[in-house]
Image (cartoon, helix red, strand yellow):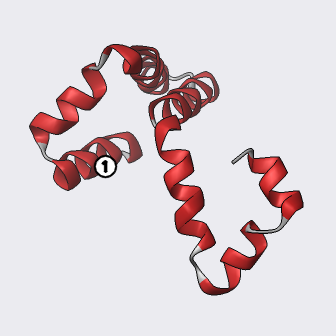
Amino acid sequence: MGNILFISGVSLTIGLKSTMQFFMKRQNFKGTISFGAGFFFVVIGWPIMGMILEAYGFVVLFSGFWPTLAVFLQKIPILGWVFQQPFVRSLLCY
């Protein structure tokens, strides 16, 4: 159910055509295939293997957004101070 809602949410947010283009980009094939395979494994009854594959696919698919997310987190009033500390910055590699 969560996978269907995730795909639906992405489609509603950026549109169906942009969603298809995002998942079908050549550099996103590894993430798309692992996310799809993970979904398949969950459906056939192997939830642990499926969730691991889905998590890997999610990280690979959205790895280009991590720097944007880091900048956004730094601008949140209290939480931003934590993310601006040198120790945290070295852990997150940005």
In the rendered view, would you say 82 is above or below 8? below
- Front position in the image: 7 or 19: 19
Q: Residue at x 33, y 13 (%)?
A: 26
Q: Residue at x 20, y 27 (%)?
A: 21
Q: Residue at x 46, y 22 (%)?
A: 31
Q: With 30 as the anchor, is 87 left or right in this view?
A: right
In the rendered view, would you say 42 is above or below 10? above
- Quadrant in the rendering for residue 4: top left
List the residue tagged with mark 1. 5
Mark 1: secondary structure:
helix
In the rendered view, would you say 80 is above or below 64? below
**What amino acid is found at the position of numbered circle 1 in the picture?**
Leu
Q: Residue at x 45, y 31 (%)?
A: 61
- Label 1 environment density (alpha carbons within 10 Å; few <14, some 14–19, many ≥20): few
Q: Residue 28 placed where, x, y %?
A: 39, 21
Farthest bottom residue in view: 77
Q: Residue 1 placed where, x, y %?
A: 36, 45
